[in-house]
Amino acid sequence: MITIDEWPAEECLAVYRHNLYMEREAALDDTVIISCKDESTLLIQIQRHIYSFHVTGSWEELSEGDVVSISNKGRIHLLYKMGQSEIDLFITNKCNSNCIMCPLSELSRKKMIPSQYQWIKEYIHVLPPDIPYINITGGEPTLDTDKFQDILKNLKKKFQKSQFQLLTNGRSFSDTSFLKETLCNIPNYTRFAVPIHSAVESVHDRITQSPGSFRQTDRGIKNLLKYDQKVEVRIVLSKINIPSLRETVEYIANNYRGIFVVNFVGLEMMGNAARNKDMLWMDYKFLFHQIRESILFLICRGIDTQLYNFPLCAIDKGFWPLAAKSITDYKIRYKEECNDCMAKPVCGGFFSSTLKLMNPEVKVIQEI
Ligand code: SF4
């Protein structure tokens, strides 16, 4: 915790520069710089004004180049740890769908975040240029088209060697002129991750709660493939789309030629997903047996598949190589029993929210 001394009432970003207080920050006069004056005083500069914080906690976890946000209440939150290999850029909370299993709640997607785009641009500005993986996510990141294109331009300019993943519902790419503009601005190594909930239009649209969304997403994927883009299709699994899964994978194999990978995705039980849990949730082991044949079908058709958000003890050992460690580090949790499991070092564990809400069963693995 810190106490604030004349702090401006806006959230801002800061880059930690250990011991460089007098040398560096003048050159970056629009960037906020943090430095420790002594063990208990933190100095922060914004546009040549210097603010002094009295630190009552420990700053040992901060190191050179870390990026933090400072809230208008003076709370400091670590956003980027120097050397971190992957980051998420949360472009907007808004979405043109309202998926029944979205980990954001409908309410949180309606909240106004006034200066989100400006904030993202500042974040991009203070990040180092050599981050290996960047996920562009939301809400639906493409919604505000001008701002989205502007952010893409910023990213392309700054991160020339990074790999990008754009998480989108794909609906915007049904518009060819939007697609063409995006392809001009998008960073070089970008893959598009697009969910198809079901090939049965009514099931897909029931899940997105948006009539017409299947047709747009389907068209969007076909357009992206037509322009030789790297497309990953995601199937987020629930009680609602499992009955039509076979039809869905057959549709994908027959209609999305050139698809990069199909990911079978377990739920993150937050927001809408938590609210609709009785309608959605299936035990991991039971779920795996429901999708097993569909995975094999795609593999036989020469399409790569992966399993996201599945604990290893829920899936047959022969399928382990398909299970990705897909949960972001800070959200990963294990059950107490997992400490005795030989597979823990290679198991992706659970979302903290899913573990708390569903308390899924585990089966400790004695030998690998
Ligand atoms: S017991 Fe825990 S660590 Fe072991 S495979 Fe299952 S979830 Fe993973």
Image: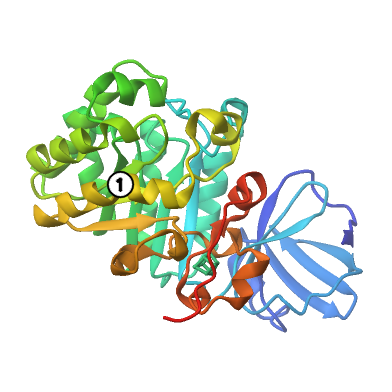
Cβ of mark 1 under 8 Å from ligand 1: the answer is: no
Q: Judge from the rendering whether residue 245 lies leftward or rightward of residue 19; answer left or right.
A: left
Q: Judge from the rendering whether residue 295 lies leftward or rightward of residue 326; answer left or right.
A: left
Q: Amino acid at mark 1?
A: Ile
Q: Judge from the rendering whether residue 311 lies leftward or rightward of residue 232; answer left or right.
A: right
**Quadrant of the rendering where the C terminus is positioned:** bottom left
Q: Nearer the viewer, residue 168 or 10?
A: 168
**Quadrant of the rendering where the N terminus is positioned:** bottom right
**Point 50% across, 46% down: residue:** 90
Q: Secondary structure at mark 1?
A: helix
Percent of width and height locating residue 345: 50, 78
Q: Which residue is tagged 1?
A: 291
Residue 308 lies in what quarter of the image? bottom left
Q: Nearer the viewer, residue 340 or 353?
A: 340
Percent of width and height locating residue 232: 25, 50
**Point 44% across, 59% down: residue:** 314
Q: Is residue 260 visible?
A: no
Residue 209 lies in what quarter of the image? top left
**Point 80% across, 77% down: residue:** 36
Relative vertical location of residue 294 with respect to residue 132 in this rendering, above or below? above
Q: Nearer the viewer, residue 320 or 367?
A: 367
Percent of width and height locating residue 95: 45, 29
Relative vertical location of residue 248 with respect to residue 346 in this rendering, above or below? above
Q: Judge from the rendering whether residue 142 lies leftward or rightward of residue 101; answer left or right.
A: left
Residue 149 lies in what quarter of the image? top left
Residue furthest to the bottom in view is 19
Counting every numbered tag in the picture gives: 1
Q: Residues within 10 Å of mark 1 (few under 14, many from 20)?
A: some
Percent of width and height locating residue 67: 62, 65
Q: Is residue 43 visible?
A: yes
